[in-house]
Amino acid sequence: PQIIVSVYGPDFFGNDVVRGYGAVHVPFTPGRHTRTIAMFVPESTSRLQKFTSWFTGRRPEFTDPKVVAQGEGREVTRVRSQGFVTISFNVV
């Protein structure tokens, strides 16, 4: 199993926009586990699309969060690295 993280936050205009996506496998062994998730955001493919998304305040985002956890189709998606999230698991 995997856990998918979607982080949202306000932009300059006060709109809620995606700040990052990430996924990590949930550990099976008992105990406390700490995982660092590399976050990324999708990017527009052309300068016109970048300008339009900035102007309208609508940035590119995934319609289905399962895309983050799957490998299929990810090689054609343009993304930019956007920091890290640290998550802690307590497995019994």
Image (cartoon, rainbow, N blue to C red):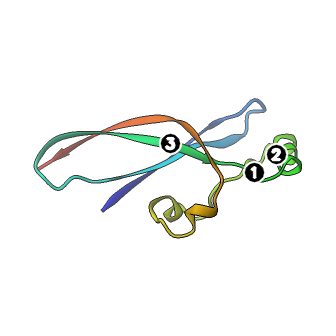
Residue 91 as seen in the image, left or right of residue 72: left
C-alpha span from label 1 to label 2 = 5 Å
The crowding category of the residue bearing disc 3, from other C-alpha atoms within 10 Å (few below 14, some 14 to 19, many at least 20), is many
The crowding category of the residue bearing disc 2, from other C-alpha atoms within 10 Å (few below 14, some 14 to 19, many at least 20), is some
In front of the other: 79 or 60: 79
The crowding category of the residue bearing disc 1, from other C-alpha atoms within 10 Å (few below 14, some 14 to 19, many at least 20), is some
Residue type for callout 1: Ser
Residue at the extreme front of the image, as rendered: 75
Contact (Cβ within 8 Å) of mark 1 with mark 2: yes
C-alpha span from label 3 to label 2 = 20 Å
* Label placed on residue 17: none
Horizontal and vertical percent position of residue 1: 30, 62
Q: Earlier in the sequence, mark 3 or mark 1?
A: 3
Horizontal and vertical percent position of residue 8: 58, 42
Quadrant hosting residue 3: bottom left
Q: Residue at x 89, y 49 (%)?
A: 48
* Label placed on residue 39: 3
Contact (Cβ within 8 Å) of mark 3 with mark 2: no
What residue does disc 1 label? 44
Horizontal and vertical percent position of residue 44: 75, 51
Residue at the extreme bottom of the image, as rendered: 72
Residue 33 as seen in the image, left or right of residue 58: left
Q: Residue at x 67, y 41 (%)?
A: 16
Q: Which structural element holds mark 3?
A: strand
Horizontal and vertical percent position of residue 51: 87, 43
What residue does disc 2 label? 50
Q: Which structural element holds mark 2?
A: helix
Residue type for callout 2: Lys
Residue 83 as seen in the image, left or right of residue 16: left
Q: Residue at x 34, y 58 (%)?
A: 2
Q: Earlier in the sequence, mark 3 or mark 2?
A: 3
Q: Earlier in the sequence, mark 1 or mark 2?
A: 1
